[in-house]
Image (spheres, rainbow, N blue to C red):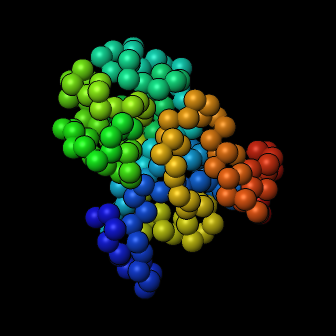
Amino acid sequence: MQGEGQAIGGRAMESMTGRLLVATPALKDPNFDRTVVLLVAHEPGGALGVVLNRATEVPVADVLGDWSDLARHPAVLFEGGPVQPDSAICLARMRHPMRRVKGFHQVSGAVGTIDLSVDPERLRESIGGIRVFAGYSGWGSGQLEQEIDDGSWFVLDALPGDAFVDRPDDLWPMVLRRQGGMMAAIAHFPPDVALN
């Protein structure tokens, strides 16, 4: 439940739905090396998110032809994570976030998930762009919180455009640089240097 606290390790944990998980150089899992994950759900039972900066070469038009006109550049599928890679999650950015739209489930502000069974023509006036993810990233109860405590992730505020950037490969350093200070310095961390 968004906004509800939960007890993790004896402390209250606020929902992180709508926030970014930015992989630290200490994260050893190659599935998440230099990734930026948008959490679309974070509840006591676990968390679910999509990797924002892993574009594939598969055009949205090849998989979801009717939706391709709404896809932001690059209009390709993204690898949302290692869980259920044959499933699809679609993020959308609403033009008017206060208007209720059938099939849209708000994550944060104007950004949310959209039901791909809805006719995209009916949404054309309401949607400012979509991004389609094959698979997702998932964590069981307490697993994400443990990874954060272990130093694998920075938890940062998302900007509405983060999920829809034109150059997704630049998202990891871009998000870190805008934090300033030591976080900005991490954006220049060499990719092939291991932390002990």
Task: Work out whether residue 107 or residue 196 is closer to the camera in this orientation and state it.
Answer: 107
Q: Position of residue 89 (x, y in %)?
A: 35, 37
Instruction: Answer left or right for 65 relative to 27.
Output: left
Res 33 seen here: no
Instruction: Answer left or right for 17 relative to 56.
Output: left
Task: Work out whether residue 68 or residue 46 is closer to the camera in this orientation and state it.
Answer: 68
Q: Position of residue 40 (x, y in %)?
A: 38, 51
Q: Residue 112, located in which quarter of the rendered image?
A: top left
Q: Residue at x 38, y 52 (%)?
A: 108
Examine the rendered structure and indicate whether residue 26 appears above or below residue 5: above
Instruction: Answer left or right for 46 relative to 173.
Output: left
Q: Position of residue 58 (x, y in %)?
A: 48, 19
Instruction: Answer left or right for 32 relative to 80.
Output: right
Examine the rendered structure and indicate whether residue 31 appears above or below residue 117: below
Position of the C terminus by quadrant: bottom right
Q: Position of residue 130 (x, y in %)?
A: 40, 31
Task: Work out whether residue 9 or residue 3 is closer to the camera in this orientation and state it.
Answer: 3
Position of the N terminus by quadrant: bottom left
